[in-house]
Image: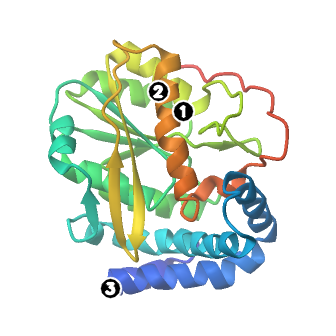
Amino acid sequence: MLSNPFLFALLRILPAAIASWIGGWLSAHVARPRMKLRDARARTNLSILRPDLSPAEREDMLTRRWFNIGRTMGELANIDRLVNDRHVRVEDRVGYQAVLDGPGPMISLTVHTGNWDLLAAHIKASTDRPGLGIYEPPENPAQAALLKRARQSYMGEAIGGEGAARGVFKHLTQKERATLYILVDERRDGQVWFPTFGRDLAPSGNLSVALRLARKVGATFLPFYLARTSGPHFTLRWHPPLDPQDLDDAEIVRQLDAFLGPACVAHADQWLALHDMDLTQPVPARPVPAQM
C-alpha cells in the first residue's frame, strides 16, 4: 500500500472504516500467502508464547494478526479521522491527562500493537507538549518519502536515520516540556531485543538510548500502548510514569518489561514484531550499545 500512491490516495477518499477493512483483507489474502517465511516464524513464536491455545486457536490469531497489519496500513491515510473519542478510548483518561499536563520533558515508550501511528497522533492531539517521533525509514525511497509525509502530518515532527541522535537531544533540551515517542520493540539482526520474554537481554538500541537520554535531560518515562478492540476502534492503556530520579535502570527495565511484555503476548494477534524473532534459537550476542 505504501508503494502504490494510487491505492494510498483511494484509501484516503474512502470512509476510514472501509479503508481499514480493505487494508486488512489485502494483507490477509494477498500479502500473507507471499510471506510464508514470516508467517511460519510467527506461528512458531506464537506456539511458544501462547502454549495455552490449541493449534486452531493460534491459527485464528495469526489470521487476525495479518488482518491487523493490513488495517494499520489502510488506516495510515486516515489517521486524522481516528484521533477522537469515538475511535480511541483511554483507560483512566483523567489520570492520563494529568500526566500529560505535568512538568518537564517526557519520553513515551510503546510497542507495535493496535495501530502505533495512531498512538503517536493521539498523544500529539492530547497535549500541548512539542512532540518528536523516532522511526526507521523503509529502504525503498518512494515508500520512505510517502511515509515521512504522512507521519509529519500527524506526528508533529518525525526523525530517523543519520543525525537523529543530535536532533533528539536538541528537541528535549531546547523545547519546554518536550515529548519523545519511541517504539522499543526494535527488530535488528533477525531478532527482537525487547520485550525480553524471559531471555537474558541487556537494554540496547532505542531502549538504551532512552535510558541515557532520560538521565541527561531529567525526563520521565510514560509506558503505554494501543490495543485494537474491533475495526478502527482502540483502547489506550498506560502505566504510571517511571522517574529515573527514583529508580535505577534495572528497575525501570523490569517494570517496562512487566507492562509491555504481557501486552505483546495478550495482543499477539496485533503485535507486528512476532514474525521478526526466533524464540527457538539461543540468545544472540549482545549488540554494542548505541552512542548518544
Q: Is residue 22 above or below residue 62?
A: below
Near mark 2 (Cα within 10 A), the count class, few <14, some 14-19 or many ≥20, is: many
- The residue under the point 68% across, 28% down is 201
Depth check: give the residue in front, 28 or 64: 64
Res 208 quadrant in image: top right
Depth check: give the residue in front, 149 or 49: 49
What SS does tag 3 mark? loop
- The residue under the point 23% across, 28% down is 175
What SS does tag 1 mark? helix
Residue 126 in the image: state x and y as whole percent.
20, 50
Say left or right for 226 vs 173. right
Residue 33 in the image: state x and y as whole percent.
75, 79
Query: Mark 3 or mark 1, which is nearer the start of the sequence?
Result: 3
What's the CA distance linking mark 1 and mark 2?
6 Å
Say left or right for 12 vs 162. left
The reply to whether the C-beta atoms of the residues labelled 1 and 2 are less than 8 Å apart is: yes
- The residue under the point 26% across, 52% down is 91
Tell me the tag on residue 210: 2
**Type of amino acid at the residue the image marks with label 3:** Pro
What's the CA distance linking mark 2 and mark 3?
37 Å
What's the CA distance linking mark 1 and mark 3?
35 Å
Residue 171 in the image: state x and y as whole percent.
33, 29
Residue with the most extreme right position = 281
What SS does tag 2 mark? helix
Near mark 3 (Cα within 10 A), the count class, few <14, some 14-19 or many ≥20, is: few
Residue 42 in the image: state x and y as whole percent.
72, 61
Query: Mark 3 or mark 2, which is nearer the start of the sequence?
Result: 3
Regarding residue 160, the answer to whether it shows in the image is no
Tell me the tag on residue 15: 3
Say left or right for 183 vs 290. left
